[in-house]
Amino acid sequence: MSALIHHRVGARAGDFFRAIGFRAATLAMLLAAALLFATMPAAAQEKVVFAINWKAESSQGGFYQALVDGTYKRYGLDVEIRQGGPQVNNRPLLSAGRIDFLLTGNLLHSFDNVRNKVPTIVVASIFQKDPQALITYPGQYASWDDLKKAPVIFIAKDAQYTWWQWMKTLGFNDSQLKPYAYSSAPFLANRQSVQQGYVTAEPIAIEKAAGFVPKTFLLSDNGWSTYANTIEARTETVKNKPEMVRKFVEASIIGWVNYLHGDRSAANALIRKENPEMTQDELDRGVALLRQLGIVDSGDSLSRGIGAIDPARIKDFYDKMVKAGLYKAGEVDLSQVATTEFVNKGTGVELRNKLSATAK
């Protein structure tokens, strides 16, 4: 009997030590795997080069926000933002394949690309309203229609061939037209004059220089129905790398929500580093105007998310440009101008509502 007991005890002891040995080996394997993963490099980030259409300022703030707060990185993207400026033309770089995305002004550029067989397409529209405006002395003109009586309207050369032609269909005339050389001195010298300006730039500069807040009339509030700050990509990129395009668009949208409604201090610091001419006061005022005037948060973006695009609105704008003589009917295949594949999904709406409620 004792021999049987000793046999069973020995067997159980063997089982125990074999189990201990198995667990130790398993633990050793797990530790080795953990050490291996710890020494491996992080998953490779996909390189993306994004060129903007001007120097860094509040109008590009959401992109810098997504860069500095790690949103692009969380989407698996290593994004490089290249500035534009008066001596920089980033547009040819997109079709040449030297950049992946381009921030452009409005739909006229996209119409031209389609007409000229340049293989690019709009994948998102950050601004629901074009920030282009007419600026007047306060109290001088009460309404948009009153501007038609102004003796002088200072308009830059490129605008004379684009939106000024549209304004002429509304009752403005060439006798009012004077060249704008990007100096407000002629405007300030004539209280009855009107000057063009980007709503987040010239009005702020005029207030700083002259000590009064000018009145602004947004073109977009008076029928200029283009989208603005549109993001363009090559058509081959959309076809061959749709997941990369989706990530970039969605991350940019989240960046814009956080820039407008969250803590934007780090993004502003980066903008000022990139563009030392920009002051904190100009950035703060720029953001306030973007919000106050609904440049980003208005229309379809309130329910469909920032970046929203409506093909019917693109057609409406094109029809107005045909009437203004900029294009011929049917000259541009509007189906090639923009895609809604990456927008209109409500991205960022819940976050915006949450941040807005917290701010209150």
Image (tube, grey):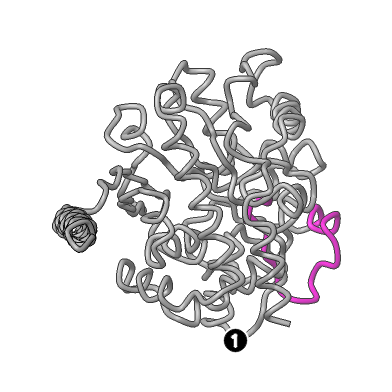
Q: Is residue 42 visible?
A: yes
**The magenta segment:** 128-149
Give left or right: position of 74 versus 227. left
User: Residue drawn at (66%, 55%), measured in percent from left and top?
Assistant: 153
Give left or right: position of 221 versus 256. right
User: Residue 316: percent from the left, percent from the top?
Assistant: 77, 31
| Position of the N terminus by quadrant | bottom left
The three-letter code of the residue at mark 1 reads Gly
| Position of the C terminus by quadrant | bottom right
Task: Relative to 290, say whether 206 is above or below.
Answer: below
Give left or right: position of 1 versus 208. left
User: Residue 326: percent from the left, percent from the top?
Assistant: 63, 26
Give left or right: position of 248 versus 175. left
Q: Residue furthest front?
A: 1
Q: How many marks?
A: 1
- The residue carrying mark 1 is 211
Is residue 146 in the magenta section?
yes
Q: Is residue 37 visible?
A: no
- Quadrant in the picture for residue 327: top right
User: Is 155 in front, or is 111?
Assistant: 111
- Quadrant in the picture for residue 17: bottom left
Is residue 277 in the magenta section?
no
User: Residue drawn at (64%, 51%), measured in percent from left and top?
Assistant: 306
User: Is 59 in front, or is 264?
Assistant: 264
Q: Residue furthest top?
A: 330
User: Residue drawn at (64%, 63%), measured in percent from left and top?
Assistant: 351
User: Is 204 in front, or is 257?
Assistant: 257
